[in-house]
Image: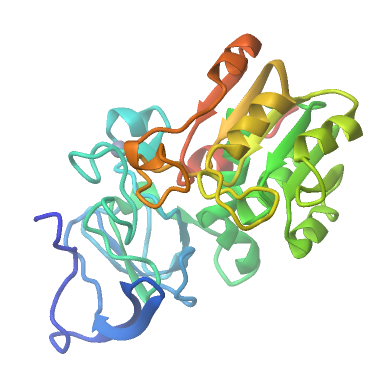
Amino acid sequence: MSATEVRSSGKVGEDSNMKAVNYQGPYKLKVEEVPNPTIEHPDDVIVKKPIAGRENMGVVDKLGSGVVQLKKGDRVVIPFNIGDGRCHNCVEGNTGFCLGANPGFAGAAYGYVALGPYRGGQAQYLQVPFADFNALKLPAGKEHDADFILLAEIFPTGWHDVKISGFQAGEIIAVFGARPVGLMASYSTSILGASKIYLVDRVPERLSAARKIPECMPIDFTQSDALYQIIEANDEMVDRSVDCVGYQAVDSSGEKEQPNIILENMIRVTRACGGMGIPGLYLPQDPGSSDEKGPKRQMLISFRKLFEKICRLLMSPLYLPWQEFVRQEPSE
Ligand SMILES: [Zn+2]
């Protein structure tokens, strides 16, 4: 199968059809009739989705002969990255970098450029490969649907971001970005026992949501430098920081992209020997970058300052395993 082919790409009219969102170009999306996905490998299942959104959740409709842990009618939630569950990286828990689901590249996902031949989840049915590994079986019924759907990506992403910063109960953390991932990272930190959370954004509704999280203080970076607001409120640097924005961050005007601003703030606001978690997306190359570095696959950061502090620094893109999140044993 070539890189341009997709799985389950039958012809309209051959079998029953479904509605799916098709990307046709920038700002152009269209709901179209496309063929239903089919079982193409014994490890596949077909999931019927009550909500045709990016978050993958639904009921098992068809099963391949090799699937042993699921049955027709099971309610399941599925992360939007795909792991085969058997390669070196999957075995170590790094399923976002699976080597087997998209050979020649570390990582696979549904309907994502360069991440394999898999169709996207914004459709009525979804073909799930390596289903025993990828589909998490939920309790029967429809109870808590609105909570379980967060397991498809946002909640485990936020949780993972905090964990990779090395966060420990009782510590103080700065979270940059209060979109869903940043809110979930802050909420996760609250659950994990933060003594204080500083959540940085500029959108009033997001800052308002931050106030609902225990121990969370919203920081509006359009008012003044977020770094100084945090230092002033906290009286010192923080133990950990998390980047939930990535290279599309903007400066205090809210208008001009400044790809390195979050990382710079993290380096400056995190104490020596603290930790930084960086899930925020940084693509290898940014042809439309606001500075001359992006097109050259480069980004300027104060590495000398970072080295001076010897912070723990761990990077992980947004897609990641929920397995670690949902199977974690409760602490004593
Ligand atoms: Zn794998």
Residue lying at 9% horizontally and 55% vertically, measured from the top left: 2
Asked whether residue 192 appears in the rendered view, the answer is no
Provide residue 5's location: percent of width, then percent of height. Answer: 14, 62
Provide residue 103's location: percent of width, then percent of height. Answer: 18, 41
Colour treatment of the image: rainbow
- Left or right of residue 102: residue 293: right
Q: Relative to 1, is 24 above or below?
A: below
Provide residue 278's location: percent of width, then percent of height. Answer: 55, 35
As drawn, which residue projects farthest toward the left?
1
Q: Relative to 218, is 229 above or below?
A: above
Provide residue 170's location: percent of width, then percent of height. Answer: 82, 26
Q: Which residue is at the front of the view, 259 or 86?
A: 259
Q: Which residue is at the front of the view, 158 or 130?
A: 158
- Left or right of residue 210: residue 28: left
Give the image quarter of residue 125.
bottom left
Asked whether residue 170 appears in the rendered view, the answer is yes
- Looking at the figure, which quarter contains the C terminus? top right
As drawn, which residue projects farthest toward the bottom?
13
Residue lying at 52% horizontally and 50% vertically, measured from the top left: 248
Residue lying at 34% horizontally and 68% vertically, measured from the top left: 126
Q: Which residue is at the front of the view, 32 or 229?
A: 229
Q: How many numbered tags mark residues here?
A: 0
As drawn, which residue projects farthest toward the front?
292
Give the image quarter of residue 282.
top left
Residue lying at 38% horizontally and 38% vertically, measured from the top left: 95
- Left or right of residue 262: residue 99: left
- Left or right of residue 22: residue 231: right
- Looking at the figure, which quarter contains the N terminus? bottom left
**Ligand 1 occupies quarter:** top left
